[in-house]
Amino acid sequence: MIDHFNKVKSYLLELDYSIFYMNEEEGVLVVENESEGIQNLVLACADPLLIMEQFLFELKQDSSDVLKNLLMKNRDIVHGAFALDDGGNKVIFRDTLQLENLDLNELEGSINSLSLLLSEYSDELIKFSKH
């Protein structure tokens, strides 16, 4: 069986991401790249998927306007989407990829999508986090 964890790890290192937490047994990596705006991006190898999540902000109250805006922005995101955590109060970016055929370009495209989202939509995210 292919060692998906080490493949993902090597891709992240090749893309110049700093790995500051790693648990091979659980298949979890947490990375950052400050120049790309990526902090605490969690990557979990849950065969057959690579799940990527980054916490963005916490909803201070239920706001249909904020949620509506996030859903509308999902349409513009190249890879991944806004989602809520299981508790329904934390907004995260989430993307999933197939591990079996994962290549460097695919992983880079997904992470670049998050980076682009953070750079283009940061003012709105900050505003939403204050609601």
Image: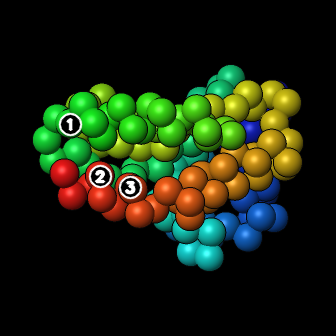
Mark 3 and mark 2 residues within 8 Å of each other at the beta carbon: yes
Name the element at disc 3: helix
What amino acid is at disc 1?
Ser
**How far across and down, in percent of the image, does residue 86 sit?**
30, 29
Closer to the chain start, of discs 1 and 3, is 1
Q: Does residue 44 appear in the picture of this structure?
A: no
Closer to the chain start, of discs 1 and 2, is 1
Q: Please report the residue visible at 40 percent of the width from the left and 50 percent of the height from the top.
A: 55
Q: Please tell me the numbered disc located at residue 125.
A: 3
**How far across and down, in percent of the image, does residue 70 sit?**
42, 38
* Nearer to me, 94 or 116: 116
Q: Which residue is mark 2?
A: 128
Seen in the image, is 72 located left or right of residue 50? Answer: left
What amino acid is at disc 3?
Leu
Mark 1 and mark 2 residues within 8 Å of each other at the beta carbon: yes
Gap in Å between the C-alphas at discs 1 and 2?
9 Å
Q: Please tell me the numbered disc located at residue 63.
A: 1
Task: Examine the image and state in which quarter residue 33 appears.
Answer: bottom right
Task: Examine the image and state in which quarter residue 88 appears.
Answer: top left
